[in-house]
Image: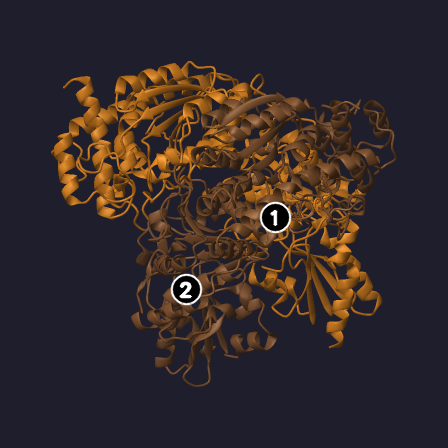
Chain colours: A orange, B brown
Amino acid sequence: MSSREKHDRMANAIRFLSIDAVEKANSGHPGLPMGAADVATVLYTRFLKHDPANPHWHDRDRFVLSAGHGSMLLYSLLYLSGYEDITLDEIKNFRQLGSKTAGHPEYGHAAGIETTTGPLGQGLANAVGMALAERIMNAQFGDKLVDHYTYVLAGDGCLMEGISQEALSFAGHLKLNKLIVFWDHNNISIDGPISLADSTDQLARFAASGWNTIAIDGHDPEAIAGAIEVAKRSDRPTLIAAKTTIGFGSPAKAGTNKVHGSPLGAAEIEATRKALGWDYPAFEVPSDILDAWRLAGLNSAKKRNDWEKRLAEAETEVRAEFERRMRGDLPANFDATIAEYKKKLAADKPKVATRKSSEMALEVINGVVPETIGGSADLTGSNNTKTSQTKPISAEDYGQRFVHYGIREHGMAAAMNGMALHGGVIPYSGTFLCFSDYARPAMRLASLMGIRVGFVMTHDSIGLGEDGPTHQPVEHFAALRAIPNHIVFRPADATEAAECWQLTLENRTTPSTLALTRQNLPAVRTEFVEENLCGYGAYELATAEGDAEVTIFATGSEVEIALGARKLLQDAGHPTRVVSVPAFELFEKQSPEYRKAMIGNAKVKIAIEAGIRMGWDSFIGTDGIFIGMHGFGASAPIEDLYKHFGITAEAAAQAAKARLQA
Amino acid sequence: MSSREKHDRMANAIRFLSIDAVEKANSGHPGLPMGAADVATVLYTRFLKHDPANPHWHDRDRFVLSAGHGSMLLYSLLYLSGYEDITLDEIKNFRQLGSKTAGHPEYGHAAGIETTTGPLGQGLANAVGMALAERIMNAQFGDKLVDHYTYVLAGDGCLMEGISQEALSFAGHLKLNKLIVFWDHNNISIDGPISLADSTDQLARFAASGWNTIAIDGHDPEAIAGAIEVAKRSDRPTLIAAKTTIGFGSPAKAGTNKVHGSPLGAAEIEATRKALGWDYPAFEVPSDILDAWRLAGLNSAKKRNDWEKRLAEAETEVRAEFERRMRGDLPANFDATIAEYKKKLAADKPKVATRKSSEMALEVINGVVPETIGGSADLTGSNNTKTSQTKPISAEDYGQRFVHYGIREHGMAAAMNGMALHGGVIPYSGTFLCFSDYARPAMRLASLMGIRVGFVMTHDSIGLGEDGPTHQPVEHFAALRAIPNHIVFRPADATEAAECWQLTLENRTTPSTLALTRQNLPAVRTEFVEENLCGYGAYELATAEGDAEVTIFATGSEVEIALGARKLLQDAGHPTRVVSVPAFELFEKQSPEYRKAMIGNAKVKIAIEAGIRMGWDSFIGTDGIFIGMHGFGASAPIEDLYKHFGITAEAAAQAAKARLQA
């Protein structure tokens, strides 16, 4: 068997596993795996540095299937290469309840799935973050411990999504030369030929942002190998435009959208088997071909042994630090440092915006947690995410800790996901809360994957003032709280900000959004408590003087208003307690007893938040009083806005009194 | 005074109005108006076809300030040109409560503000939609009635946002040659020089998508004029890269980020007045310069007179139709047609997915409403948005009614906003509900502006099955309902789908999202009622046989489950009513009496929706039973998923019985 014949048969193994799994599930996308099988075969058997027996090996190359609908390509590769999570039974169970072989690759379902993909363009942007994390870790730990490539397979759809522009221009600017993207250039999308909707010269577009570009026949293994060789030597990220035929091998459907997202059907499968000379029953891979695949996996694994030796030879402290960071553990002195800092805050009682108290907390954290990588989407001075320890990362210096992501909220969020997935770094970065909408698809995926990312969202209400309703979030607290496995923190002062950051870093399986004010706020936590009270999600900040007639729940900047209302009410003879609610999601996890006690039995329940009511009924009931926003904001100075929209201590106290007298 | 001197003084009038307004407000962005004043002056005084005295003239050129933070540029232009909405007092009231001169340009505040901008990149994508609407209307009504340009001023930030790529590649593909974009190429963003975060060759990038590109000195009026002349003759959209100095004229701050988003300060204003030879008090424009501006406005207005004549000469029917469409009125037979169709549905009782019943409704609507323009983000066959009347629009044929937007959800939504703003067309288009996240920033702006756009969002729950959690919306109903002035429709069958479409088209000041199923659903409305019951937001679909012990609220595909649970409960002796809730937002607008009656007094209240609970407490109270999702979905066939997540008639009936017995 010539090497070309062998290649073809190895690639056909991918094609038929994919065809058969999609057919059995009666659901899925056979076209991409059939078209990209040659590229994937060359990559996995001749280039990818990985060890199927030790799939989490830190210095492995990463492979991201950005075109996640072609999931059977990845599952086939993992099965054939010998990853034990993906058995033949799993492939036969494609898209069934509880299988590891979900419709789209799901991070955490099986080793070898580096990220969750499916929403187009996300994988490409994740990969940019992975490639950046690799360069950062390389700068800090050297070539001996960190030196790997990030490969991506992206489809036409990935490149049409706007996020791809953010990702590619960012990667080009940072000269992430260890990022190699295959564009599965099959010219077909779901509706038909790409020419229905696009006529972009993609090579010129990537080149315009400083990429190395190569165009090849995506079915020619030597051309594929040659392109990868060139790409690996490039001083810039590389786009390999691999011209392929979607559904390659299917006599009737290849090259058409009919093979994109539907099973081939029994007759066409039979015809495809004939056309490609694949004379085996469904799901059967002949042993010589399976052996060849497994051997390739074994061969690649040798590099891990060399790496293990280098790790063993490293200085004890370097090794310990590298392993701590890759495990995701925080430094041992983290909690003590936070406690110490909270003591100082209790003494100082700073009156600052929470974006500023976030910066103060980060200044402390970044001093003891060297793996945090800050950033901003061109709002560095507004988001207050840069501290004394974090200098800008650039193509000339990856050994720093602050990323100027540019005006690219979506790409930023997805890149942060990729950095977290890579490991060794903890990414946080910011924009205005209103523009969390731009980043939302990536924030959702962070939640679905369960990864540690800090989304810093400042200017969190009408309190930002004159910029007006385009910049004033009102529905965003509710909309972000709606995402499962996503914690929205809204601290009320510097102590709560410190506690929210502590929780953000300690929670390894849930991303966090920190909603922070532009305007100054007084300290509301005036005594030192070592315990992290924000960890309860809601806690009693001020007790009632007497049996509570009124309970006021509030978050962030409105806690000050709640305390003001409490004073007015108590002065009028109505005992009132205030509950600060920095994180709905954490409160829901408390015991029923704790929750019941916090909600309490006061006759009048009020919630104050400069956002919409949605979500608050679980605290105040449907008959509770809500002081907040009922529509979009307006452009005006902050004092005018809070008055105009009736979010004041006076309004809250008056509403409570009216209800008490009713 | 030489013509250059005159130009400079006219441009300086913009500069100083902007400087003075920002200084007085102590808030705002002087840098862009100062830098782009020359471009804007040439455009408004020598090219823009408009009539300040009749600012809504249909065939006017559109100007979009995509870099909305430079709002004082636009307000200055409108005041100087003689738009009566923007008085000098309004300019002095910049960024104050109730002023028309909000922090960012707000559509509806004043004539001449063609769209709301501020969130970067949106204006550029709106303009693409406007330019497309112009070509569509031109194809239908001819050069005599529709023949105008769309101009955009975009900043570096607009071009860095991913949405810009979607917009520009779409515009290039459709060869929208009457779209002319000025890139205010000042190389400065908030954080500092653009080189901190980007090194893209923007001319090459635009050229890669088929644009005509021109680079000029943005302070040279003749170069600006020459570029516009060339652009107007182009057969492709044009990017004019105008190299400018941000904060032009400020001796100490020009060319730096210090002048981007902060007032200049008294001393620097004084220095700038000296440097530019502007020897007038704050807010004063010398009469010769104001006269020159006003004269330019008057000169341009002459074209309107010619157009009015052409309109008067048009055939009566053509004129009437043109005017009807530009007013936004629906055809007179619209309601009767819907009623007729509902009669047919009551007889046929089709069992189809609501994406299909949406298509059936559209087939009827598109037959009588010629201004609807359908589309899809590459999911035409899945979204079911294409009907027999709608053939694809292309660069060769703008006279059709279906847009292949490509895999560009964000650009699509923003382009639809632009089409609606242009007028004469009613845009609707689709993607999967889960990917409404990609389009969300534009959907929010549609809501803020209050414009008629139909966002068709199919595959609206775990009911889509095998594609899994990346494609299964769970938080999206809540997240979209959270947006003020945005109606989320979730019809339960073909009759409700028809009613929801009727409401979508009849509501001129609120955009609508139509959440539609992939799976088939039985008819739940089996008798003809002419009244649009969905217009109540919630209505009693099935009464209880006896005094209701249980009320079940449900939407869309879960109404069938609610009816199943009702049967189980009634069979067990528990009278149960079912309330269908196709639109929360419309229910909230009903009278307190109606709402009270609909909520009712049944001992047990249940809500069933294949999404999260958030928002449902207002129907069922905090102690109500919620049957729905509590986290992300999973990849599996639909039947398995509904069982797995406990969203079944049996589960609902059982929970109700347990509660009744408690």
Q: Residue at x 66, y 25 (%)?
A: B186
Q: Looking at the picture, tell me which residue is in the foreground, A179 or A471.
A: A471
Q: Looking at the picture, tell me which residue is in the foreground, B311 or A302.
A: B311
Q: Residue at x 72, y 23 (%)?
A: B255
Residue B83 shows which numbered tag?
Answer: none
Where, by quadrant of the figure, is residue A284 drawn? top left
The x, y position of residue A196, in whole percent, is 36, 38
> Circle 2 sits in a helix, a strand or a loop, which is it?
helix
For residue A533, side relative to residue A266 (left or right)? right
**Residue count near mark 1 (Cα–Cα under 10 Å), binned few <14, some 14–19, many ≥20:** some
Mark 2 → mark 1, Cα distance in angstroms: 34 Å
Name which residue type carries label 1: Trp
Residue B57 shows which numbered tag?
Answer: 1
Label 1 is found on which chain of the structure?
B
Q: Quadrant of the N terminus of chain A?
A: top left
Q: Quadrant of the C terminus of chain A?
A: bottom right
The x, y position of residue B11, in whole percent, is 74, 30
The residue mark sitting in front, 2 or 1, is 1
**Residue count near mark 2 (Cα–Cα under 10 Å), binned few <14, some 14–19, many ≥20:** many
Is residue B74 in view from this perspective? no
Label 2 is found on which chain of the structure?
B
Is residue A287 in view from this perspective? yes
Q: Residue at x 35, y 17 (%)?
A: A227
For residue A406, side relative to residue B100 (left or right)? left
> Circle 1 sits in a helix, a strand or a loop, which is it?
loop
Q: Residue at x 50, y 37 (%)?
A: B167
Name which residue type carries label 2: Ala
Seen in the picture, residue A246 relative to B137 is either above or below; the reply is: above
Residue annotated with mark 2:
B498
For residue A207, side relative to residue B197 (left or right)? left
Seen in the picture, residue A330 relative to B630 is either above or below; the reply is: above
The x, y position of residue A205, in whole percent, is 46, 25
